[in-house]
Each structure stands twice: as C-alpha cells, then as structure tokens.
Amino acid sequence: MRIRNKYSFRIALHLILLLLQLLFWNFTIDDAFISFKYAKNLFFNQEMVFNIGEAPVEGYSNFLWVIWMMLSFVFNVEIVLFSKVSGLIFCHLSVLILYRLAFRISKSKDLSYIINFFLCFNSKHSSMVSGRFGDFFILLSFTCISLLFYSRCIC
C-alpha cells in the first residue's frame, strides 16, 4: 500500500503531462524546420549549410539539437516525429531529475511535488512536442546541476 501511495502522485503527474502533450501533438513550430534542414544537409551532403552550394551560415539555434536531429536519418525515422518523441522523452526525464534534485535540496517530498507541478504546468506543454530544442536544453541543465550536487554534496 505504501509503494502505491509513494508513486501515485508522480505517475498521475506524468499521465496528465502526457495528455497535455498529446493535445498539442499536431503543433510544430516553423522555426524547427531550420534545424531539420541543417540536419538533413549534414547527413546527406556532409555540409552544415541551409542550401547546398552556398556559403555556410549559422542559421540554426542549437548545434547539439541539429546533431541530435541528424540521428533521425541514421535510424530512418521521420524527423518531425523523431523531434516530437525526443521532446516528450526529454521532458519526462527532466521531471524525474528535477524531483530527485528538489528532494535532495529541500528534503521535503511535498515541496518536490510542488516544484514538479509547476514545471509540468507552466504553459509550455505546447512547446514540449513542438520540434524545438527547449526540453533537450532543460534536461541537460538539470542533469549537470544534479551531477554537481551529487558529486560535491553541496546541499
């Protein structure tokens, strides 16, 4: 009985977050297609350019996201689907990492739940599956902060 209570709030939070993400599944930010095109040209033509044959211009927002999107061609997965599933996974991993980090700092499960609640419902559920790199950046940030706290025992 205790195990169910321990995880029920977190599971419910993830399910609600997933439902919100599915509501916005068909929404893709047009800016994401810039990174998609750079990834496509890098994979097929080994050039980090928007248009083949033109001088290289850094028109993408995030180099790591372009490299990550290139993996969609490696695995032969449609790039928009790959970016949306990646954003969904990165978002849920961020929630898990933030819960552990908040609990480690505050020593309070209630405060950890509240912090996670605000992360999940801060009106960015549309951008979680929009094809952009935001959740990738958030996941990397939370991971780095967690590693810092766990390695140095700052808290």
Image: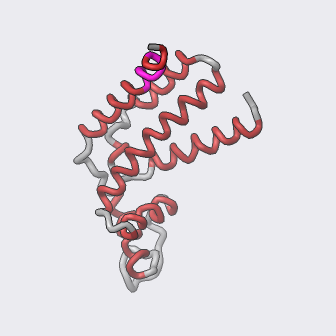
Residue 121: x and y in percent read 38, 28
Residue 1 sits above or below residue 71 on the image: above
Which image quarter holds the N terminus? top left
Residue 58 sits above or below residue 152 on the image: below
Quarter of the figure with residue 15: top left
Residue at left offset 64%, top offset 20%:
106
Residue range corresponding to the magenta coloring: 5-10
Farthest residue, direction top: 1
Of residue 43 and residue 122, the one placed in the foreground of this image is 43
Q: Main secondary structure of the magenta part?
A: helix
Residue 47 sits above or below residue 88 on the image: below
Relative side of 15 to 60, left or right: left
Which image quarter holds the C terminus? top right
Residue 86: x and y in percent read 40, 51
Farthest residue, direction front: 1
Quarter of the figure with residue 54: bottom left
Report the colour scheme: secondary structure
Residue 9: x and y in percent read 42, 21
Residue 90: x and y in percent read 45, 45
Residue at left offset 70%, top offset 36%:
150
Relative side of 100 to 60, left or right: right
Q: How many marks?
A: 0
Residue at left offset 37%, top offset 64%:
72
Relative side of 78 to 64, left or right: left
Residue at left offset 37%, top offset 43%:
128
Residue 86 sits above or below residue 118 on the image: below
Of residue 54 and residue 131, the one placed in the foreground of this image is 131
